[in-house]
Image (tube, rainbow, N blue to C red):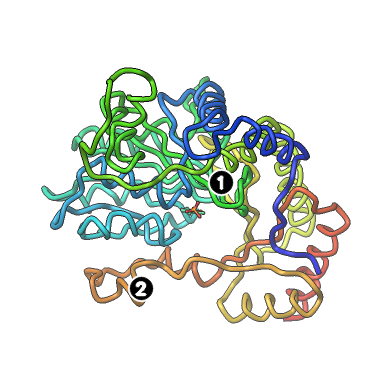
Amino acid sequence: MIPFNKPHITGRELEFISDAVDCGHISGNGKYTKLCQQLVEQQWGFHKCLLTTSCTDALEMAAILLDIKPGDEVIIPSFTFVSTALAFVRQGAKIVFADSRFDHPGIDEAAIEKLITKKTRAIVVVHYAGVATDMKLLMEIANRHQIPVVEDAAQAIDSYFINGDSKQALGSFGVLSAFSFHETKNIQSGEGGMLVINDPKLVKRAEIIWEKGTNRAEFFRGEVNKYGWVDTGSSFLPADTIAAFLYAQLLDFKNIQLKRIELWNNYQRLFESWDSDRVKLPLIPDYATNNGHMFYVLLESYDLRQKLIQHLKANDVLAVFHYLPLHASPYYMDKHDGRKLPNASYFADNLLRLPLFYELSFEQQQYIFSLISAFIKRN
Ligand SMILES: *Cc1c(COP(=O)(O)O)cnc(C)c1O
């Protein structure tokens, strides 16, 4: 069986976990948490990072930090994982769902402006498959309306927005950004996440929310002589053993990224050489880089995709679809304002994700490609 995903282990995870245990500090905000945060801040130019137990948690911190309240509106793409919306829904916000672009599953930047009202308190973008949203266009709209941007960068580690001769890491644009280190992501710790705080004014409060509403982080730095309950919050910190695992992955990130991009390019070459107009390939716009997070193809219809999934499964290959559009989900359907979001629905029905993980071999990729091309020719 070729699985859809197989978490990659770099080889140093247990060494660092063992060291964390020997250090005697295995709760949150220990040695490895600090090492991870520093490495990420330096590597990608983020102002401040805090490790969290998941990207879902990082997004919850973002919604709290932005003081989202009942009656506020938050613009979020419909074609995304539930966590993107969940944090804002829990704060009582009304979600105004945005459609995908016609040529890419990411948010339709140009359609955002007409969703903005006096009540809009945040715009959340998702860099789908690690491919940048057009951040120049998006930040121009958000800045003009003075609305904070949150990046759901769960899939976007080590990916960039290209602006002329320079490139800037995804996750460094929004006032706040959230990354995931779930085992399905490029760099992983089983479960794990990170909040990036790019607005210096939010750092102090972020640390308090992170530490159950207490100023404990300041206390341990010796900045205050006692600590107590000063704000809302929760327990958002991962154990330092998780951070130790993550540190091994982060030290090896260049190698992991090279390998995943190579696998992505292999798929691209195989499908391009076939040159079928019946299977569409992913678009990487000129302003975006590719971090090899996900390779998908677009089929002509929902039925064809479902039959292909069955066919692949019968031949020991697990390929998967994803995202039932959030605006049509059982939980939010009757709260949605009724607008049709045809592009989100199109990607939900037609997109198929192929296996992509570090240990996937080229022979396995060729096998997957030949199964798909032979099936499409017959159907
Ligand atoms: C994976 C993912 C999440 C959730 O990440 P967790 O770390 O599992 O909470 C959120 N948003 C997007 C776009 C994702 O791909």
Q: Position of residue 281 (x, y in %)?
A: 63, 56
Q: Residue at x 40, y 45 (%)?
A: 236
Q: Residue at x 66, y 63 (%)?
A: 277
- Quadrant in the picture for the C terminus: bottom right
Q: Amino acid at mark 1?
A: Phe
Q: Residue furthest right?
A: 363
Q: Residue furthest left?
A: 118
**Does the beta carbon at disc 1 come under 8 Å from ligand 1?**
yes
Looking at the rendered image, the disc whose residue lies closer to the viewer, 2 or 1, is 1
Task: Check disc 2: other Cα within 10 Å, few if <14, some if 14-19, many if 20+.
Answer: some
- Quadrant in the picture for the N terminus: bottom right
The answer to which of 154 and 135 lies nearer the viewer is 154
Q: Residue at x 84, y 53 (%)?
A: 361
The answer to which of 223 and 344 lies nearer the viewer is 223
Residue 328: numbered disc: 2
Mark 2 to mark 1 CA distance (whole Å): 27 Å
Quarter assignment of residue 300: bottom right
Quarter assignment of residue 341: bottom left
Left or right: where 181 falls relative to 216: right
